[in-house]
Each structure stands twice: as structure tokens, then as C-alpha cells.
Image (tube, rainbow, N blue to C red):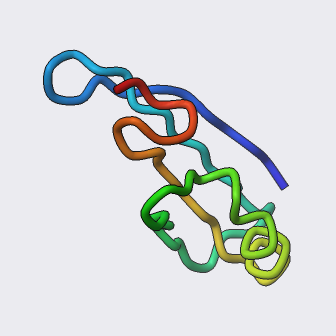
Amino acid sequence: MEKENGTITGLGGLELFWQAWLPESLRAVVLLIHGFGEHSGRYGNVVESLVPEGIGIYALDHQGHGRSQG
């Protein structure tokens, strides 16, 4: 499994954190959208279940959540 992360610049110049978990052989991709009061780092159980099945996961911390500004 390969893990990547970084930031993108959102509205108003805020830096929004993203991360991805990618299997060696990719067959599908999921965009994970976290719930209210949460962040993308809380979904390790989803990562552990899907990535071994060849499903890559991309996740973004919304403004004011997790490692994103705001």
C-alpha cells in the first residue's frame, strides 16, 4: 500500500489537507467524505478493508476539520 498526502488551496486561500491510500494493483477508487465533527484520519477501518481488495481511497479534511485550515 502506498500512502500519499498534501494540501490544495481552497476558497479564500485556505489550505485543505488530503490523503490517499493506494493498493499495488488498482481496480477502483473511492472518494471518502467525512461526517460532521470528524476528519479523514478516523477511517482506518475503511482503509484496512478496501485497499487490500484493490480499492484506492482519496479523502479530504473539510475546512476547519482535521489538518485543514479554517
Residue placed furthest toward the left: 12
Which quarter of the rendering shows the N terminus?
A: bottom right
Report the side of 8 relative to 54 (left or right).
left
Q: Position of residue 20 (x, y in %)?
A: 62, 50
Which quarter of the rendering shows the C terminus?
A: top left
Residue placed furthest toward the top: 13
Q: Position of residue 52 (x, y in %)?
A: 85, 76
Q: Position of residue 38 (x, y in %)?
A: 55, 56
Residue 4 versus residue 55 in the image, above or below: above
User: Which residue shows up at 66% across the image and 70% down it?
Assistant: 26
Please tell me in which quadrant of the rendered image residue 45 appears.
Answer: bottom right
Closer to us: 52 or 14: 14
User: Which residue shows up at 49% across the image and 56% down it?
Assistant: 37
Residue 53 versus residue 18 in the image, above or below: below
Closer to us: 69 or 13: 69
Closer to us: 66 or 46: 66
How many marks are shown on the rendered structure? Answer: 0
User: Which residue shows up at 29% across the image and 21% down it?
Assistant: 14
Report the side of 63 relative to 27 (left or right).
left
User: Which residue shows up at 60% across the image and 64% down it?
Assistant: 57
Residue placed furthest toward the front: 37
Q: Position of residue 50 (x, y in %)?
A: 74, 79
